[in-house]
Each structure stands twice: as C-alpha cells, then as structure tokens.
Image (cartoon, helix red, strand yellow):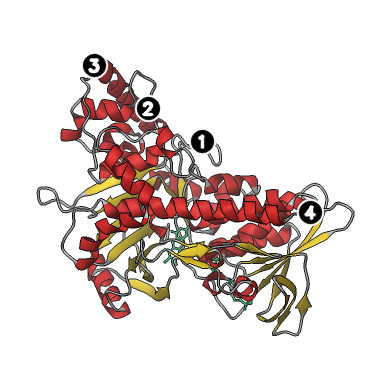
Amino acid sequence: MESDTRKSILVAGGGSAGWMTALYLNRLFNHAEKTVDITVVESPDIGIIGVGEATVHSVRFFFAAMGLDEAELMRETNATLKLGIMFRGWMKPVDGEMHQYFHPFEHQRLGRVLDISSMWFLSGRAATERYDEGVCLSAEMIKRGHGPKGPNTPAYQGVVPYGYHLDATLLARFLRKKAVEAGVVHVEATIDDIDVAGETITAIHTNTGQSFSADWYIDCTGFRGLLIDKVAPDNWDSFEDALPCNRAVALQRELAPGEAPNPYTVATALKNGWAWQIDLTNRQGTGYVYDGNRMTADEAEAELRDFLGPQSRVLKSTHLKMRIGCRKRFWVGNVIATGLAGGFIEPLESTGLHLINLAAGLMGTHLAGTAPTDDSRESFNRLMRGFYQDLKQFIVLHYCLTNRDDTAFWRAAPQTVEHTPWLKAQLEVWKHKVCEYHDLAGAFSTTFTDENYRYILYGMQHTPTLGLVADGAESDRMFSQLRQMQENACALTMTHADYLAKLNGTAEQN
Ligand code: FAD
C-alpha cells in the first residue's frame, strides 16, 4: 500500500468469508495507524450459507491473531472442541462391524532409527489394532471422552492440536461485531449494479441508491461470485470429474437428553456420498453431501433422516447446490474472490474457513507492497490454485482406496484417482514404503502433510509391504513411550463435557 494516500477496500458479502477477511485486513493495515478504509456491503435480503460448522486446527491461530477472546468466541457460537474426524463406513464392514478410522490433527514424530509408521508395521501391530489408535494421542483421548484442555490450559492451547465446531450464523455475527468495533464500516444493502472498465471495477451500486468506489474489491458473495464473474466470466476450473458430490442437504437436530457433544466430527459414508455430524453445545449440525446426478434431493433427505433414526428431532433442513472447483484466476484486475466465490471443495476435511484464512493472509502480503503488479496477481493466483489442487488430491485419496461395491457411486470411486496423476503414481510407491515427509515436497500448503496422508492411507488399508526386520526392543520402547504419552495426555486433560460445563458456567457446584 502507498503510505501517502489512504487506500480503500470494499468487501462485498458478509458471510464468514467477508467478515474474516475484513477483520484480518483491518487488523493488518489499521492496527498501528489507519492506512486503509475498509467497508463491508452485505445484503440484508440474501442470507449467508449457514453451514460450515467444523474447522481445522489452524483456524485457532487466526482467531488468536485477531485478538479474539477464545472463551467469548466459543460461548457466542455454541462451540465445542474438535480433535479430528472419525470416518465411518468408507470401506466394507470388517467382521460384520462398520469400518472406521480416525484422522486427528496431531503429528507424532518420535525420533528413532525408523519412523513410527514403519515401526508400527514391522512390529506386527497392524494385525491387531487400528493405525490411529496405535500411533497418536487423540484417538485414546476421545475414547475416554477427553478434550484437548485441562482446567488451566491457556486460551488457544491444548495438549494436542484442536479445531472447533461452531454455529456458522453465530460466527458471522460475532466476527461482524468485532470487525465493526475495530473500525470496519458496515453497509446493509444489496449490490444491484457494477460498473466495469475492462477487468477493473470502477463502482458498485446498491438497491438503497448508494454507490461505492474502492481501490480493491473483495468478492465474498458466496457461490454467486457476483464481482469476479463480472470482470472474468469464463474463469472456472471444475473439479466435478474427480469429486462428483455437488449437492447437499443440511439438517439441524436436537441433541437427545443426556447426549454429550462429541469432540470430533463424524463423516459416515452413505449410498451416494457421505453424512457429516457436528455437535455444538445446543444441537447437532448434520448433512448429506451427495452426487446429484445419482439421486434426487428428496431421496437424499429421506436417506439422511433414515440414517439419523426415527427418534431424531429435526429442527431445520436446507438443500444446497454446490459448485465444485475453483477460479482459474482468483485475482483479476482490482477484484479478488475468496470463500465460496473463489472456490469450493466438498467439506470432508472442513477446510472452507481455513482456505479463507490462507487467502486473507496472502491478500495482506500481496496488497501490502507499494504497488501490486501483474506479477503480484499471478503469484497470488498460482498459490491459491495450488492450495485448491492440493486439497482436491487429498480429498480424492479418501475415495479412491475404497473397496465398497454396494452402489454405482462407490464402484466408480476408485477411478477418481485417474484425475490426480501424481497421487495415482504415488499409491504404487506407497505399496513398498511408508508415506514420508519428502514425498509431499512441492506441495503448496502444509495443511495436510505426510502425517495426514498416512492416517487416510492406513485407515483405508493401503499399507506397504516392508522388507525389513523389526528391532523388537526398539519398537517396544517406542510404543511404550507412546502409551505413556497417551496416559499423560489423559491425566492432563478434562473430559470434553466437563470442559464445556466449566466454560459455559453450567458445571455442578459441589
Ligand atoms: P456465504 O455464507 O454464502 O455469504 C455470502 C454473503 O454475500 C452473504 O452475506 C450475502 O448476503 C452476500 N451477498 C450475496 N449477494 C449479494 C449482493 N448482491 N449484494 C450484497 N451482498 C450479497 N467450511 C468449513 O470450514 N467447515 C465445514 O464444515 C464446512 N461445511 C460446509 C458444508 C457445506 C454443505 C457447504 C456448502 C459449505 C461448507 N463449508 C465448510 C464452507 C463454508 O460454509 C464457507 O466456506 C463459508 O461459510 C464462507 O461462505 P461465504 O462467506 O463465502 O459465503
């Protein structure tokens, strides 16, 4: 930004994307002295998407960096804590039991001659226990109902990394309040006209008769992509060949009396996609992400209700069409698209808010220069495209290893890997060695590293055949160290239920 004249940013849209981005840019540019005028124009008539209720763990650092009080944030959004995702039914049942595995946020790199995964295979543990239960702390913690925090754990810290489950509508409201208190201008109006010169927006006009001009326009208008489509209409890279789930039905259901919120998301494979279950303090958010070419919205809702069971009291249902893919150019002229306007990949790993966080950070660094050039734009676009491509590949990994053959959807799932050639080749390599850190060299984002890949690979039974002989004593030492760490973690933390009761002031007084 030039320091001699004050610049202006107009954020169009006030969902999570609009308010996270406004809050971030305001904190960056106006913290010490005001250098940029930031205005959010939000339609009072067009609602926010209102789903998007689970996060990855790094969103914590965003909230912390924004100076938000964690306890207040959690209370205001009916939040619970999340240690990872339990995947159910993504493979055929094993011995009549539904197949399941857990993908935690934590990374254990216990230093020995061999890494923990190789040791786990060589010691024969694969035959008797689940990979996640053998190598991480969180799987044991959730078995015992524990969250990541003890009674005095500082804000935004945990014994293991954690994310949140939170009410998306309340989150947008909370972020709006904080952004406005920090000096962001909030205009309630619907944008109904946009003036453009080439690839540059010169003004926007609203249904209240107001007009706005800014140096930069951030398109946060959700799937509409109102501003970015105006300056670059042919600008979409569809991922639906690889990831065909393009519809969702979202339900909210009451938690049953005495049902304690789980400190993890559940993702259960259904006939033509999968269902999420996200527990808040006051209700469960659930939904079915499905392939709309294989079933109707009514069939999807019926299957989801059946899955939830007749006893479920449903509070609200919403049907959504999803455009899967991302912009070829996120930043065109003076318009930058983020959130759903920038792209969307099915929310299997809860990455929507995380991608907004990544984009906001990159906007900050790219706009902070004295005069961003075409090279700045291309740099931003290359990185954003890279994040989405990496994520597409990681999500395909969850599908392509399935052995389910009960529906045409699942029979087709192994072919999704044809759209991710690097992954296809690598799966062959990973038949003969563990997935390791360097295999992911060149990835754009460090969100999902070799550790994450291993939880999915070995959870989905894509295991290597190793030609080594285990050092029994070494492996016993490693796994007894891990068991001790699990015990310590449980000793240091409270149950999730106790933590929430303490946080919300509902703990019983003795
Ligand atoms: P929206 O919430 O749609 O907001 C759009 C805004 O634009 C609104 O304020 C609207 O009023 C405004 N607007 C639109 N048109 C105009 C106009 N003409 N004038 C003025 N304003 C306008 N993400 C996660 O992190 N975790 C999850 O678990 C997760 N689950 C998801 C499940 C589903 C089924 C879907 C579809 C998404 C999920 N996401 C998830 C993604 C997440 O919901 C979004 O990334 C996030 O909510 C950001 O949405 P947004 O702000 O881009 O769009």
Label whose residue precedes the other's in the sequence (3 or 2) = 3
**N-terminal-most mark, 4 or 3:** 4
User: Looking at the image, is 496 positioned above or below residue 123?
Assistant: below
Residue type pointed to by label 4: Ala
The residues tagged by marks 1 and 3 sit, at their Cα atoms, a distance apart of 38 Å
Specify which label sits upstream in the sequence, 1 or 3.
Answer: 1
- Determine whether label 4 and label 3 are within 8 Å by CB: no
Res 488 label? 2
Amino acid type for the residue under numbered disc 3: Asp
Label 2 vs label 4: CA separation?
52 Å
Q: Earlier in the sequence, mark 1 or mark 4?
A: 1
Residue linked to disc 1: 153
Q: What whole-number distance in Å separates the C-alpha atoms at marks 3 and 2? A: 26 Å
* Viewer-side label of 3, 2: 3
Q: Is residue 312 above or below residue 438?
A: below
Q: Is residue 425 visible?
A: yes
Crowdedness of circle 2 by 10 Å Cα count: few (<14), some, many (20+)?
Answer: few
Q: Which mark is residue 448?
A: none
Earlier sequence position, callout 2 versus callout 1: 1
Query: Which residue is under mark 4?
Result: 371
Residue 299 position in % (x across, y down): 26, 77
Name the foreground residue: 501 vs 10: 10
Q: Nearer the viewer, mark 2 or mark 4?
A: 4
Q: Are marks 3 and 2 in contact (CB under 8 Å)?
A: no
Q: Residue at x 20, y 50 (%)?
A: 99
Foreground disc of the pair 1, 3 = 3
